[in-house]
């Protein structure tokens, strides 16, 4: 049964991340769901590529920090930096861009001390870094301590906390490390972990979340189990962070105390699972029902296959507004 939530709170968001002409990653994956859920979104792009890097060929440009700061200065010159309630950041690519975002975040917090700063610390996945190693320390020491919410995947969380995550208990400890660093809301977006002493399985993944109120000391840690789908998905983390942020923005004032993050993650997971299933279904329709070939490294995937795995966001917009599945958080 479809699940809809009231969305009377409209956020005004500045989103700083990557952009592609074709496909759905970075700002292309984040903007539409944020707008569809009732929020205003302005974007600054850290790169502009023809397509995402899962394809064999990519054209385009990586923007320097000076370009990002110049665009923000243009907003300031016209008073357009006034009224932002949220700052969202994704792919930075280099240390200079992280420092640029640090500067922008500080300036926005001066204008609005209640600014919600959401950081997706895009470092890598499946044991491989996408960015220079120096960015790990910059996220750990600079951006994350400023953030209201962070959304690393399992590999990124291990890098940020220098903690190996093999179980839910490991994940809880890693979340606590980030709370100690000053982050009140932490979501490990997907992790392959052992649960209740049982062996981890490659058929299920877990989201692990943790909300912490530093003033009261109250904490709520939870997990959500969801099926792992075979495929070569790109942009799913950007999409999920936007969904979680949109839902959390709308729910924050309706919860007395903790609980908003868990509900936001339930809704975001339901939408994400539905869109990814629609993407797999589209792939199978495009390739006469063939199963996905596993283990193909980047650079060896046929472009028609990569294109078939572009997230089916627009045809699935009904799943953004009212997810059909139910994924429930359980306390850990």
Image (cartoon, rainbow, N blue to C red):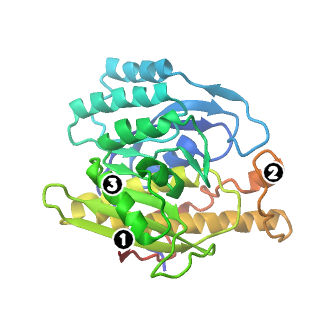
Q: Earlier in the sequence, mark 1 or mark 2?
A: 1
Labels 3 and 1 touching (C-beta < 8 A): no
Q: Earlier in the sequence, mark 3 or mark 1?
A: 3
Across and down, in percent, residue 70 comes to: 44, 18
Q: Is residue 98 visible?
A: yes
Labels 1 and 2 touching (C-beta < 8 A): no
Q: Nearer the viewer, mark 2 or mark 3?
A: 3
Which residue is more in the foreground, 165 or 143?
165
Residue at left offset 49%, top offset 74%? 225
Label 3 sits on a secondary structure element that is: helix
Q: CA distance from mark 3 to mark 1?
A: 16 Å
Q: What residue would you read off at disc 2?
A: 301
Residue at left offset 59%, top offset 64%? 275
Label 2 sits on a secondary structure element that is: loop
Seen in the picture, residue 246 relative to 72 is either above or below; the reply is below
Q: CA distance from mark 1 to mark 2?
A: 36 Å
Q: What residue would you read off at disc 3?
A: 177
Q: Quadrant of residue 21?
A: top right
* Total numbered labels: 3
């Amino acid at each position: 049964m479809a699940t809809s939530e009231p969305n009377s709170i409209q956020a005004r968001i500045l989103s700083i991340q990557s952009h592609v002409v074709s496909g759905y990653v970075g700002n292309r994956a984040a903007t539409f769901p944020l707008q569809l859920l009732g929020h205003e979104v302005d974007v600054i792009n850290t790169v502009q590529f023809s397509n995402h890097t899962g394809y064999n060929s990519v054209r385009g440009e990586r923007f320097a920090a000076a370009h990002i700061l110049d665009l923000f200065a243009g907003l300031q010159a016209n008073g357009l930096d006034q009224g932002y309630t949220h700052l969202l950041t994704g792919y930075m690519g280099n240390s200079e861009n992280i420092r640029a975002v640090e500067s922008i975040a500080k300036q926005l917090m001066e204008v609005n001390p209640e600014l919600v700063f959401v950081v997706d610390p895009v470092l890598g996945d499946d044991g491989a870094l996408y960015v220079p190693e120096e960015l790990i320390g910059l996220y750990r020491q600079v951006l994350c301590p400023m953030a209201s919410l962070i959304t690393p995947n399992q590999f990124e969380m291990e890098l940020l906390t220098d903690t190996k995550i093999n179980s839910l208990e490991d994940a809880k400890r890693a979340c606590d490390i980030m709370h100690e660093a000053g982050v009140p809301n932490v979501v490990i977006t997907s992790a392959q972990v052992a649960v209740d002493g049982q062996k981890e399985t490659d058929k299920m993944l877990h989201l692990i979340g943790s909300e912490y109120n530093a003033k009261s000391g109250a904490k709520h840690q939870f997990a959500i189990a969801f099926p792992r789908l075979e495929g070569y998905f790109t942009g799913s983390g950007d999409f999920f962070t936007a969904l979680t942020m949109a839902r959390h923005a709308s729910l924050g004032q309706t919860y007395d105390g903790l609980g908003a993050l868990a509900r936001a993650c339930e809704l975001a997971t339901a939408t994400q699972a539905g869109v990814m299933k629609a993407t797999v279904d589209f792939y199978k329709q495009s390739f006469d029902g063939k199963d996905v070939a596993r283990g193909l490294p980047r650079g060896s995937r046929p472009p028609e296959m990569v294109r078939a795995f572009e997230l089916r966001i627009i045809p699935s917009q009904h799943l953004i507004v009212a997810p059909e599945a139910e994924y429930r958080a359980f306390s850990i």
